Amino acid sequence: MVNDIFPILVSFIYVIAVLLVSYLLESHGRLGRESARKLVHFLVSLWVFVMVYWMDSLWARILGPIAFIFINTFMTLKAREGRAIGMIFFPVALLAVSILYSFSLISAETAISSVLVMGAGDSAAALIGTRYGRHQLFSKSIEGFTAMFAVSFIVLLAFSSLPWEESFLIAFVAAAAEVLAPHGLDNLTVPFAVILMMEVL
């Protein structure tokens, strides 16, 4: 645990810095509210590399996600905004992935791929869908679905050892899990869909 003190500190400083930069960009009109939120979503998902490659103990890996579950719950209740529920489920997903990886129930590449598909893919889906979405697909858009699929496919090709055919299939399933999920729940359905598919395949 002592060896994990530094990466824990770095993790908290990194997340606070991401939140601060996002807030400043939004408050100065450089980013809209949704864009700022998705920037945080993507950048915080990169923490998975710290969790996998730098932290040794279970407690170090789950401390950050647990802390931000409480922080985000407080912020969501204060904002009284239903769409912000995803802010709670995001660290819940990170917590679940951290536990599964710590007990060797999933591999490093599954942990990394599932979190990055959630962070990068979902952010791309939201931003592209909001800006260019013209064709409705359930409660989302075909354009957002396509962005989610494309980014997920790239992530899987880059960070997993799966052949491209399996990466293609998992990316499609992840995109489907995103488009079918109610607002916020995609932060749970997407990573778990990727985990299940990668571990089965």
Image: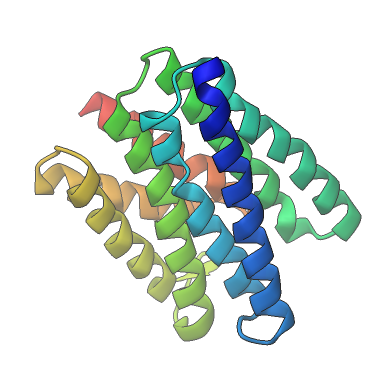
- Nearer to the camera, 29 or 37: 29
User: How does the figure colour the protein chain or chains?
Assistant: rainbow
Residue at 46 percent across and 53 percent down: it is 119
Residue at 87 percent across and 50 percent down: it is 77
Rendered-image quadrant of the N terminus: top right
- Nearer to the camera, 143 or 36: 36
Task: Note whether 108 is above or below 1 in the view shown.
Answer: below
Where's residue 159, x and y in %?
Answer: 23, 44
Residue 177 visible within the image: no
- Nearer to the camera, 63 or 111: 63
Q: Quadrant of residue 147?
A: bottom left
Left or right: 101, with 10 as reference point:
left
Residue 175 visible within the image: yes
Q: Quadrant of residue 59?
A: top right
Task: Note whether 43 is above or below 74 in the view shown.
Answer: below
Rendered-image quadrant of the C terminus: top left
Residue at 21 percent across and 40 percent down: it is 160
Where's residue 52, x and y in %?
Answer: 39, 30
Left or right: 168, with 87 as reference point:
left
Q: Quadrant of residue 89?
A: top right
- Nearer to the camera, 68 or 90: 68
Where's residue 157, x and y in %?
Answer: 18, 50
Where's residue 57, x and y in %?
Answer: 49, 16
Query: How many numbered tags mark residues here?
Result: 0
